[in-house]
Amino acid sequence: MSGSDDSLFAPPEAAWQRVSPALVRMRRTVLLSTLGVLALLLIGLEVVLDLPVWLWPVTAAVVLGLAGFTWWMIGRNARRWGYAELEDELYVTRGALFRRLVVVPYGRMQYVDVQAGPVERAYGLARIQLHTAAPGTSAHIPGLRAEEAARLRDRLTAAGEAQAAGL
Amino acid sequence: MTEDFPPPPSREPPPDKPFHRLSPLTPLVRGSIFLVAVAATTWDDLRTGNLGVLGVILLTVLLAGAVYGWASWLRTRYWIDDRELRIDTGVVYHQSRRIRIDRLQGIDIVQPFVARLFGLAELKMDVAGGDKEGSLAFLPLAEAQRVRQVLLDRRDAVRRSVQPSSVEDASPEGSPSWVAPDHDIAVLDLRTLLLSILLSPETIALLLAVLVFTLSAVFVGGLVVAPGLPVLIGFGLVVLRRFSGYYGFTVSQTRVGLQVRRGLFDRNTQTITLARVQGIVISEPALWRPFGWAKLDVSVAGAGGTSETDGGPSATTVMPVADLAAVHALASHLLRGHDVDVDVDVDVAGIELDLPPTSATWLDPFGRRFMGVGMGDDLIVSRQGWFTRSTHAVRHARVQSVRLSQGPLQRRLGLADVHIDSPPGPVHVRARHRGAAEARKLWEAEERNAKAARLSRL
């Protein structure tokens, strides 16, 4: 089954450029810190409310199970992000469960955003967002190394100006 | 996109240009609701000559309002020169708004009910790349039409001289020879309008409600009828809004585009610039199909996604109800745009639509048989919906981006979706639940077609 999937979401010519592995590390770190806070809260709650002892392992199992699943999904999801710059358009693919592949002509781009939050900056990452006149386009790429994001933005902006087709 | 026009250093109006004023009846029209309210509450007191405290307060407020309205009218002046429209307003705080004439997208003439009684109209300026709208309210109707024509003529003159071949607003060089300066191409007759309004889902809901209430009145007693009243009033309001909104619906061809005029109480005039049309939707509600009727909506760049939410008429509607043939003709006209001399295939009805594979029944057991997608030399068309069958069509040259998507269930069944992204509006061409290989082929083909169409325009 995975063979047919790959052909459905295959890149047009060249291979996909994948996002930085630091994205996985960043997301998993965020997951672990959230988990830590959650664990403290739950422990506090059970101590304060003096809940029965059998609840402890049950909560722990549920929380750890969810965390494990998220951990696994983060890896799967990050591996499926990809983009390919062609002569006239940008291809972006994403999603492990719900898969997407969008092709955005450079000429249709209205503007390009590069964003980096504090956590992303700590990992040297940035995300890039492409805007066309259609809100449905939703082409963004997270987890780019900062210099790669800047390069892509400049490249896209230049190509967009050269081929501007507007509406 | 939205850089502001640099304001001149001086606040003073251009000395060599005489200014214009709005109609002196403006304060009367603006305050009419208040006037009626005051008259209604104090009428008895006024007649007996015995004003209560409330009456005195109301009359004072009315007087103050009249003075303010008059001052406001005195303070409101506008100028039109070759490059800009300038509107100065404000009694306490002065405001000067300048609208670049070459940025005007369209000018609508609106006549609210009271203004219409006085023969007045409001001019609404639609400006590219901004939600700051300019408006002149109110002018005598004839003057409003004259000012509108002057502004549109100047705009065309400015655009021709400044940018000979703008890609975004490819205005035609002069008017195409086949277009008569101003003629009606579709008029909605009263009988069709009334019938189409009565044949709406709201009517069925009302009939059901009446049935339920009658039955409950018979079996339980008269008490239950009372809650039915709001339902009736709501229904009446929806019908009335639709009727008054679409009354006298006329589509005509003008030099600048298609003009839509509509409205019973509030007269609305709206111009659709053909170069900005992104795509069309033809809707055929189940109740209309025996009559062969359909409704036509259009997506216009920059107009946003206003839709018929509260039962009222929508700004995207080009024809609220007409024969399918007439709707198709109008749709072709809109899709063709200015490509009059070019051989383009814009016949929506002529494109064959394929059903999704039978495995899609698992995901949409009922809707599958009503879905379809098809591609022509210049169009991509999709259809869906059982109760309201809607057909969306976009020209390859207008496609913004092409998207392929697949959820986990679709993956199990070997299906995928293809979406064509268009600017905000009612149009959304989508091919849902196609076989994966077919979806990939469709996606690639549409990307190729869109690219070819885009490049041929550059």
Image (cartoon, rainbow, N blue to C red):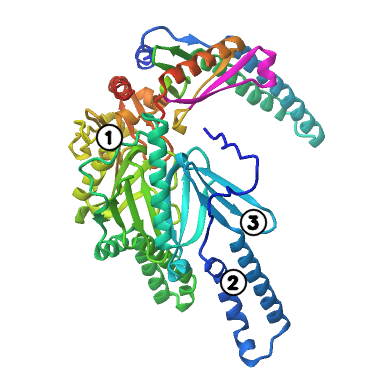
**Magenta highlight range:** A108-131
Q: Is residue B174 left or right of residue B54?
A: left
Q: Is residue B290 in the magenta section?
A: no
State the residue position of label 2: B34
Q: CA distance from mark 3 to mark 1?
A: 50 Å
Asked whether A117 falls inside the magenta stretch, the response is yes
Report the residue marked by disc 1: B381
User: Of the residues shown, which amino acid type is indicated by label 2?
Assistant: Phe
Quarter assignment of residue B27: bottom right
Residue B397 appears in the rendering: yes
Kind of residue at disc 3? Gly
* Residue at 58% over, 15% down: A143
State if disc 3 and disc 2 touch (CB < 8 Å): no
* Mark pair 2, 1: CA separation: 51 Å
Q: Is residue B13 above or below residue A20?
A: below
How many neighbours does mark 2 have within 10 angstroms: few (below 14), some (14-19), or many (20 or more)?
some
* Pointer 3 residue: B90
Q: Is residue A102 visible?
A: no
User: Which label's residue is closer to the chain start, 3 or 1?
Assistant: 3
Q: Viewer-nearest of labels 2 and 3?
A: 3
How far across and how far down the image is residue B258, in percent? 31, 47
User: Is residue B453 left or right of B38 when viewed as pictured?
Assistant: left
The residue located at (49%, 76%) in the rendering is B223
Q: How many marks?
A: 3
What's the distance in space between the residues labelled 2 and 3, CA to CA? 21 Å
Q: Chain of mark 3?
A: B
Residue B177: x %, y % from top left: 21, 41
| Front residue of B158 and B219 | B158
Q: Identify the mark nearer the N-term, 2 or 1.
A: 2
Identify which residue, B14 or B66, lies in the foreground: B14
The answer as to whether the residues below labels 2 and 1 share one chain is yes
Q: Nearer the viewer, residue A119 or A45?
A: A119
